[in-house]
Image: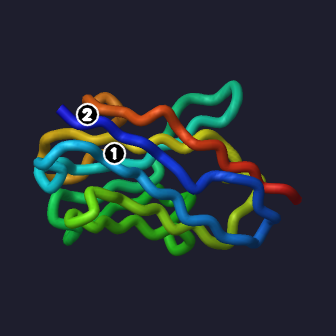
């Protein structure tokens, strides 16, 4: 089992950058693929980015491709989401999720473990 804690959210102006972190407990974190999802008020939770166990395979939603970068440091049990060129459309609660699988998944139902989320607010 793994527990996830997100951090790094906050208020940023449009065009700015933020780096989110997802810290995991447990010694087998390197066995888990990790995804980032986001949920804006009144909307469904949507896929943002995901990374496989080793960090060698990543996938992104079209809406963030070229602006967001997912990475991981298994020695620190942490996955990062570097976000740049933020727009008000990126404003949401961001969640990280993990699953004991090799390849990353874009479907939220593929992930068994979830963090509590961190709020990202983008002012125009």
Image quadrant holding the C terminus, namely bottom right
Q: Secondary structure at mark 1?
A: loop
- Where residue 13 appears, as percent x and y from the top left, is 81, 64
Do residues under tags 1 and 2 come within 8 Å of each other at their CB atoms? yes
Q: Is residue 41 above or below residue 12?
A: above
Q: Secondary structure at mark 2?
A: helix
Q: Which mark is residue 110?
A: 2
Point out the residue furthest to the top here. Answer: 42
- Where residue 82 appears, as percent x and y from the top left, is 51, 68
Q: Which mark is residue 30?
A: none
Q: Nearer the viewer, residue 8 or 53?
A: 8
User: Hey, which quadrant is residue 111 in on the image?
Assistant: top left
Tally the numbered discs: 2
Q: Is residue 9 above or below residue 116?
A: below
* 47 on left or right of 34: right
Point out the residue furthest to the right here. Answer: 124
The chosen color scheme is rainbow
* 108 on left or right of 89: left
Task: Identify the residue at horizontal 62%, vertical 71% (top origin).
Answer: 84
* 81 on left or right of 118: left
* 117 on left or right of 18: left
Residue indicated by mark 1: 106
- Where residue 11 appears, as percent x and y from the top left, is 76, 55
- Where residue 14 appears, as percent x and y from the top left, is 80, 65
């Amino acid at each position: 089992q793994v527990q996830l804690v997100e951090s790094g959210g906050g208020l940023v102006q449009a065009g700015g950058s933020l780096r989110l972190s997802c810290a995991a407990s447990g010694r087998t974190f390197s066995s888990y693929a990790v995804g980032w999802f986001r949920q804006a008020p009144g909307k469904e939770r949507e896929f943002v980015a995901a990374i496989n166990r080793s960090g060698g395979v990543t996938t992104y939603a079209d809406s963030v491709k070229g602006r967001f970068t997912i990475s991981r440091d298994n020695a620190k049990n942490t996955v990062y989401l570097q976000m740049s060129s933020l727009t008000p459309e990126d404003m949401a609660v961001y969640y990280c999720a993990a699953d004991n699988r090799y390849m990353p998944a874009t479907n939220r139902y593929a992930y068994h473990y979830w963090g509590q989320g961190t709020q990202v607010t983008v002012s125009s």
